[in-house]
Image (cartoon, rainbow, N blue to C red):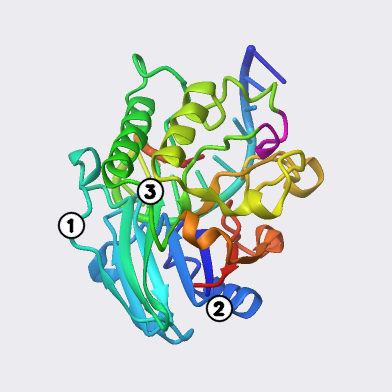
DNA sequence: ATGGTCGATCTTCGA
């Protein structure tokens, strides 16, 4: 099964680019974040034309929004939490009906957290930490994940080489010690395996996002790994390959995040 | 230390 995740930063603006992702990655399932599209305006037919017969979306006006596009039939998980009681369209869970049995798939868009890494003066940072803490408690209550995949823009780069400069980003939201510990606790709570670091050793740089604000994103290469693929322990042995579609950052009208794909046996 | 660029929506907010 080929599972991809991409923060598309407006699904309507970048609808044609989904075709390029399909051409380059051939995903069976594509999870999107930051669709920025209310449900009644979601371009279902345009996406179905790329071969995704099964589509679920959870969106709102202007901000956030997640969607799952799939060639594999699925049912939407109905009883997952309304994180932080905000109804802000940051998670969508489905159960995929694979030939070998059901696989749960979770698509997350964790709050970015604003600019100041202090929960007492920045409510966005407090929301980010609360959101991750709720996810951690949710996984802890359910025990180790089984036949499950969790993907998305988690907006945290946990490892030293998930950022271009560990030292210079220690105080920058996305790489602060409190965030790194929070995401590590979440990962432990579900016994999740970091699929990208399964393929790329921890001492090698690994990025999935490059800021729009850089003068020359490719030359300066000041990236961060904000997008993740986690798998449950029982699926870890079946991890087969990964692709970071870095070329997508150079496309016309690119998202600041690039698509990430993992192929695994289920 | 600062400011840099996007997208949605509506002049500013969130990233």
Give me the residue at 69% from left, 27% from top: A166
Residues at badges 1 and 2 in contact (C-beta under 8 Å)?
A: no
| Element carrying mark 2 | helix
Could you classify mark 2 by the number of other residues whose Cα lies within 10 Å: few (under 14), some (14-19), or many (20 or more)? some
**From where the camera sits, is residue A75 visible?**
yes
Pinpoint residue A113: horizontal percent, then vertical percent: 42, 32
Pinpoint residue A214: horizontal percent, then vertical percent: 69, 40
Q: Nearer the viewer, mark 3 or mark 1?
A: 3
What is the spatial separation of the Cα atoms under label 3 and label 2, in whole angstroms? 36 Å
Magenta segment range? A160-165
Give me the residue at 29% from left, 59% from top: A59
Q: Nearer the viewer, mark 3 or mark 2?
A: 3
What is the spatial separation of the Cα atoms under label 1 and label 2, in whole angstroms? 32 Å
Q: Quadrant of residue A253?
A: bottom right
Q: Is residue A53 left or right of residue A236?
A: left
* Chain under callout 1: A
Could you classify mark 1 by the number of other residues whose Cα lies within 10 Å: few (under 14), some (14-19), or many (20 or more)? few
| Element carrying mark 1 | loop
| Element carrying mark 3 | loop
Pinpoint residue A182: horizontal percent, then vertical percent: 44, 30
* Chain under callout 2: A
Which label sits on residue A79? Answer: 1
Check disc 3 and report the residue beneath it. A144
Residues at badges 3 and 1 in contact (C-beta under 8 Å)?
A: no
Check disc 2 and report the residue beneath it. A19
Q: Quadrant of residue A189?
A: top left
N-terminal of the two: label 3 or label 1?
1
Q: Nearer the viewer, mark 1 or mark 2?
A: 1
Pinpoint residue A227: horizontal percent, then vertical percent: 54, 50
Q: Is residue A157 above or below residue A34?
A: above
* Chain under callout 3: A
To the question of a shared chain for discs 3 and 1, the answer is yes
């Amino acid at each position: 099964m080929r599972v991809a995740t991409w923060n598309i930063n407006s699904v309507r603006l970048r609808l044609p680019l989904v075709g390029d992702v399909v051409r380059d990655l051939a995903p069976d399932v594509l999870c999107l974040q930051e669709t920025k599209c209310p449900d009644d305006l979601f371009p279902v037919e345009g996406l179905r034309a790329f071969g995704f017969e099964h589509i679920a979306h959870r969106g709102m006006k202007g901000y956030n929004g997640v969607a799952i596009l799939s060639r594999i039939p699925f049912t939407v998980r109905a009883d997952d939490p309304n994180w932080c009681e905000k109804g802000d369209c940051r998670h969508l869970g489905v159960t995929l009906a694979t030939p070998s049995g059901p696989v749960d798939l979770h698509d997350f868009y964790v709050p970015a957290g604003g600019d100041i890494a202090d929960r007492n003066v920045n409510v966005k940072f407090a929301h980010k930490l609360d959101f991750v803490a709720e996810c951690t408690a949710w996984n802890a209550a359910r025990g180790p994940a089984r036949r499950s995949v969790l993907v998305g823009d988690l907006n945290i780069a946990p490892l030293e080489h998930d950022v271009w400069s560990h030292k210079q980003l220690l105080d920058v939201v996305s790489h602060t010690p409190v965030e790194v510990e929070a995401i590590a606790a979440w990962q432990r709570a579900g016994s999740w395996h970091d699929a990208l670091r399964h393929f790329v050793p921890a001492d090698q740089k690994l990025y999935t996002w490059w800021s729009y604000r850089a003068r020359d994103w490719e030359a300066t290469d000041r990236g961060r790994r904000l997008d993740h693929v986690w798998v449950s322990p029982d699926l870890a042995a079946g991890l087969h390959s990964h692709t970071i579609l870095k070329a997508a950052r150079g496309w016309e009208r690119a998202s600041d995040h690039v698509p990430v794909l993992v192929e695994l046996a289920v």
